[in-house]
Image (spheres, rainbow, N blue to C red):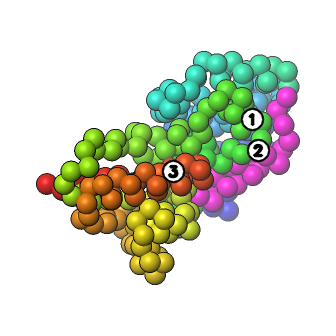
Amino acid sequence: MTAASAGVFWWLHLREGRAVERAAAKAFDEDAGIAVHVARHEAVTRRQEPSTLHVLFGLLQVDAVTTAITDAGGDVSGLEDRVLTALAEGDVGEAEAIERVLGRAAWIAQQGGRGISCADLWACFADDHAGAALDAQQIDRAAVLFRLCHGAGPPPLPASDRGTACVELRNDAYTTMELVVEALIEGFRLEPVEAERVMRSIHETGRGTLGPMPMAAARVGVIAARDLAERAASPLWVAVVPSA
């Protein structure tokens, strides 16, 4: 059993065995470990089956998460009140939802050879009770994920179209390879073969650069790529880098 799988097992069965606890501790990074500890405590205290709402409540006790929500224009207090109300009413959802979220988060983390992060957990909320709470509070889930993934919001675009620039793209654990290829083709008019090559380079090295090109073309391409990523709820990092 891998560390991530053991962590999921520990959460789903709410067990206290030392071997499982040790494996679970390795399954999550520090912040996510805090979140799942709080989530587990909340479920046990309320004598409820574990749910995505408990995980969301746990995430709301992590500073990095609440900062990302606030920076994305969300109301942390209102969201926490909504989650607590749902938990008090016992409306926690089906067990399959938490299994899917934790299983998917564990898979994402394993691909990167690391512990499950808060971003992994956040990215895996979907049509479940946690996702419904986020949508009801009008939380921009994609904008929050971007900030959790990259540590800040998208870099601003240059105010002027003068001069030349390069375009930088960065790899992340959530944007699909297919979306990156599509963004390169639609935004920067790359041929499919070239777009595939650039995508592979970004995936393998962590980042890639296009250009130099006219500033106007760089701006148009980045806007198009960001629009595509936003529609897909993807945290694709793409920015204009003015030439010196």
- Residue 124: horizontal and vertical position, in percent? 66, 48
Q: Amino acid at mark 2?
A: Asp
Q: Which mark is residue 227?
A: 3
Q: Depth-wise, is mark 3 or mark 1 nearer the camera?
A: 3
SS class, disc 1: helix
Q: Bounds of the magenta span?
A: 91-108
Q: Are marks 3 and 2 in contact (CB under 8 Å)?
A: no
- Up-down: is 92 above or below 22? above
In the image, residue 94 lies in the stretch drawn in magenta: yes
Residue at 33% across / 44% down in the picture? 157
SS class, disc 2: loop
* Residue position for label 2: 127
Q: Amino acid at mark 1?
A: Ala
Q: Amino acid at mark 3?
A: Asp
- Up-down: is 47 above or below 199? above
Q: Which mark is residue 203?
A: none
Q: Earlier in the sequence, mark 1 or mark 2?
A: 2
In this rendering, position of residue 1 left or right of residue 233: right
Query: What quarter of the picture does the N terminus occupy?
Result: bottom right
